[in-house]
Image (tube, grey):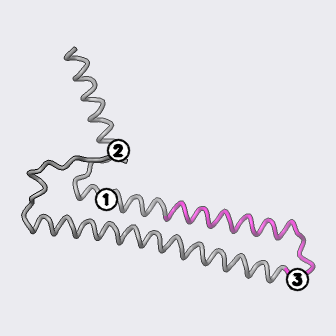
Amino acid sequence: MIRIEIPQSLRELPAPLTDLGNDAVKLGRQVWLAGLGLVATVEENAAGAFDRLVAKGRRSRFAPVAEAEKVVTTARRQVKKVGREVGGVVEDQVAVVLGRLGVPSRREVQELTRRVETLAQSLR
């Protein structure tokens, strides 16, 4: 986790800027919670679909086991795919919110670190 030390001069921002920052944090939390809610909903629906398939399979004794395993595998694959997509959307939204707050990205921090190391080497 990247920790950023906030200078004392920035800790005492005017109220409108503080309110703007607080609003951005609230928005970020809402986006994060919405993503988590979406993942939970997808999991619940997938579990319900899985249970319905199991019940249907019990009623139909003619369905071969291999076919049932294929359906289960397909369902699991689809749930994982949707989970990855939702995770990507949530990560993108969090990155946007953090960018609006002025928090540097991992790439920006790595580039700055590289530049500082290069400068430090040239001063030796």
Looking at the picture, how far across and down is residue 48, in whole percent?
67, 80
Q: On the image, numbered disc 3 is attached to which residue?
A: 60
At x 9%, y 60%, the residue is 13
Q: Nearer the viewer, residue 94 or 1?
A: 1
Look at the image and give the residue range highlighted in magenta.
58-86
> What is the quadrant of residue 15 in the picture?
bottom left
Question: Of callouts 1 and 3, which one flags the residue occurring earlier in the amino acid sequence?
Answer: 3
Q: Secondary structure at mark 1?
A: helix
Q: On the image, numbered disc 2 is attached to which residue?
A: 106
At x 42%, y 73%, the residue is 34
> What is the quadrant of residue 113 in the picture?
top left
Identity of the amino acid at label 3?
Ser
Identity of the amino acid at label 2?
Arg
Question: Of callouts 2 and 1, which one flags the residue occurring earlier in the amino acid sequence?
Answer: 1
Tell whether label 2 touches label 3 (CB within 8 Å): no
Question: Of callouts 3 and 2, which one flags the residue occurring earlier in the amino acid sequence?
Answer: 3
Q: On the image, numbered disc 1 is attached to which residue?
A: 96
Furthest residue in direction top, as rendered = 124
- Residue 62 drawn in magenta: yes
Q: Secondary structure at mark 2?
A: helix
